[in-house]
Amino acid sequence: MATTILSAEKDPMGAAISDYFNHHRADRLRVFSSQFEEDEIPVKELFRSIQSMPILERTALQMATGRILDVGAGSGCHALALQEMGKDVCAIDISPLSVEVMKQRGVNDPRLINLFDETFSETFDTILMLMNGSGIIGRLNNMPEFFQRMKRILRPGGCIFMDSSDLRYLFEEEDGSIVIDLAGDYYGEIDFQMQYKDVKGDTFDWLYVDFQTLSLYASECGFKAELIKEGKHYDYLVKLSIA
């Protein structure tokens, strides 16, 4: 799996986060995909307080214990919430601009590093992968490598809290039946590209995975998956621990 760190000219989300932090406003953070129409991410949402976070995220933050790793930490909203709760957290991201904002916002231990960089060898009791945390796995065939990496950085008795969504609702017909091309790629494998002002990132793979499929891969890789809570729109929070 890629161990990339973004450059400023390829980091639209980081540019949006930096703008919002420094100027209290941001332009549109546009999202493109070959599978969907153009969308946008409300940049203000990336700075939300714990009170305005979805129930799945709040639940994960409350359940996190010990030394915590916040993966894809962005502006640091989860890390700051954990710090307010008196918890010990290391926040990582591949965006230099986002990491700089985290530093300025008071995140205690922000790191510019990719989760899959083998030089990052610290171990943790809890790994948090929120805001569709399964996304960074990219594709289903990356699951074995992902779980092998998790085994190396999880402490004994540790666990991962990850949220994701089952996108099958996008293929639902009016009569309630679901039409999915079983011969094609898995329906939760999406390609995305972001743009902020004139900063356009590279296309990247992003994985939405249903709980049953995630459980199957987890089991094959020596993990057990426990459904913690379901959201209102096909989303869910899972706890993954070494079996």
Image (cartoon, rainbow, N blue to C red):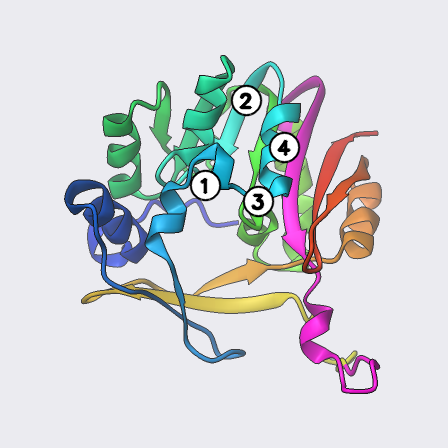
Identify the secondary structure beneath mark 1: loop
Q: Which residue is mark 4?
A: 60
The answer to which image quadrant residue 29 occupies is bottom left
| Crowd rating for badge 3 (residues with CA inside 10 Å; few <14, some 14–19, many 20+) | few
Q: CA distance from mark 4 to mark 1?
A: 15 Å
**How far is disc 3 from disc 2 in space, using C-alphas?**
20 Å
Kindly give the residue lying farthest to the front in the view shown: 51
Q: Mark 4 near mark 1, Cβ–Cβ under 8 Å?
A: no
**Label 4 Cα neighbours within 10 Å, binned few <14 / some 14-19 / many ≥20:** many
Badge 3 vs badge 2, beta-carbon distance below 8 Å? no
The image quadrant of residue 180 is bottom right
Residue annotated with mark 2? 68
Lower sequence index among marks 3 and 2? 3
Q: CA gap, disc 2 to disc 1?
A: 13 Å
Mark 4 or mark 1, whichever is nearer to me: 4
The numbered disc on residue 72 is: 1
Residue 119 visible somewhere in the drawing = no
In the image, 13 versus 39, the foreground residue is: 39
Residue 153, position as x, y percentages in the image: 59, 25
Residue sitting at x 49%, y 23%: 82
- In the picture shown, does residue 120 fall above or below 37? above
Q: Quadrant of the C terminus?
A: top right
Give the mark nearer the N terminus: 3 vs 4. Answer: 3
Q: Nearer the viewer, residue 116 or 240?
A: 240
The question of residue 167 being in magenta is answered with yes
Residue lying at 56% horizontally and 57% vertically, measured from the top left: 138
Q: Position of residue 169 (x, y in %)?
A: 71, 72
SS category of the residue bearing label 4? helix
Q: Amino acid at mark 1?
A: Gly
Counting residues from the start of the chain, the first of labels 4 and 1 encountered is 4
CA distance separating discs 2 and 4: 11 Å
- Most distant residue in the bottom direction: 174
